[in-house]
Every structure is written in C-alpha cells, then in structure tokens.
Image: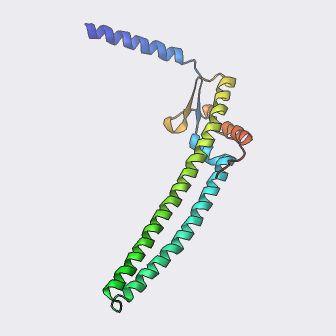
Amino acid sequence: MKYFVKFFVVTFLVLICSYASAEEKIAVVDIKYVLNNSKAGKAAQEHLKKTFSQNQKIYSAEEKKLKKEEEDLLSKKSTLSKEDYKTKSDKLREKVKKYQIERRKSFESVAKLRASAREQLLNKLDPILSAYIEENNISVILDKKFTLGGSQAVDITNLIVEKLNKDLPSLKLK
C-alpha cells in the first residue's frame, strides 16, 4: 500500500509538471552546423586544412628521404663493417625518432588550434543564444543532435548563424 501511494504521488507530480511545462517555448539549434557554416567557422576550417596539408607535404617528403636512407644503408650492409653499419643504423634510428616527435608535435599543434577555434566560437555563441532566449521568451534551447524530431518552426539554426556572422566575422588563430 505504501508503494501504491508513492507511485500515485510521483505520477501526479509528473503529470502536473508536464502540463505546466507544456506552455514553455522550446527552440532547437544545430550547433555543428553553426560551427561549420558560420563565416568564422569556415575560415578556421580552411586555415586548419591548409596548415594540415602543408605539414603533411613536409613530413611526407621527410619520410621518403628517411626510407631512401634506410634502403641505401641496407644495400651497403654487406660492404660495411659491423661497427660502421651499427653506427649508421643508430644515427638513422635517431633521425626517425626525431622525425616522429616533430610530426606528433605538428599534429598536436593543429589539434590545439582546432580546439582553440572551437572554444572561441562557442564563447561567442553563448551570449548570442542568451540574448535570443531573452528576446523571444524561450525556456530551453536544445542541440539538434539530441532531439528525435520536431517542427521546423522551432529550428533557429539559420538565425543564429546570421547573428554569429555579424558578431564574429573571423577568428584569430595563432
């Protein structure tokens, strides 16, 4: 009996809360779309792609050079003394380690730039969303990826992109 009363009370409260919140306004924003299609977001993506491809070219050329050195060393293995072969192979290993460290640092710097750009965009987006909530008396704004369905009338993504383009035409990436 005790559980029946608890169940009844909880169900009653849920129904009252859901009825009371039925009057609330809800909006949906596709954050990924906003970040990728705003002027600043597109410019940041282009900058990051350009930096990444430049790094790829540099490290691809370096990798080919190291492979050629390895092939040369292997072809000379029979003509070199054991000590010479060992010293040259150790030098080559050190070059490879240095190459791997530099390549990892390069990719990490691109990842940091990407995170920085995303953070700048999100920091600028927060006041825009807050202002939109105040102006239009909206209770909740949800990210579109967390919704299962809904009316297109509650989707404010394009409005937010326009406001973000006005407030933040470009990012300053280092």
Direction from residue 22 to residue 6 in the image, left or right: left
Q: Position of residue 70 (x, y in %)?
A: 41, 80
Q: Position of residue 167 (x, y in %)?
A: 72, 39
Camera-nearest residue between 5 and 132? 132
Q: Quadrant of the N terminus?
A: top left
Camera-nearest residue between 78 and 43? 78
Q: Quadrant of residue 83?
A: bottom left
Camera-nearest residue between 157 and 154? 157
Task: Tell me which residue sits at (27%, 11%) in the image.
Answer: 3
Q: Position of residue 117 (x, y in %)?
A: 61, 47
Q: Quadrant of residue 76?
A: bottom left
Direction from residue 165 to residue 59 in the image, left or right: left
Task: Tell me which residue sits at (67%, 52%) in the image.
Answer: 43
> Residue reaching furthest right?
166
> Residue reaching furthest bottom?
79
Camera-nearest residue between 120 and 139? 120
Q: Position of residue 60 (x, y in %)?
A: 52, 71
User: Measured along the vertical axis of the image, is residue 44 above or below residue 143?
Assistant: below
**Total marks placed:** 0
User: Measured along the vertical axis of the image, is residue 152 above or below residue 77?
Assistant: above
Task: Tell me which residue sits at (40%, 84%) in the image.
Answer: 73
User: Measured along the vertical axis of the image, is residue 70 above or below residue 118?
Assistant: below
User: Measured along the vertical axis of the image, is residue 106 above or below residue 125?
Assistant: below
Q: How is the image coloured?
A: rainbow
Direction from residue 82 to residue 103 in the image, left or right: right
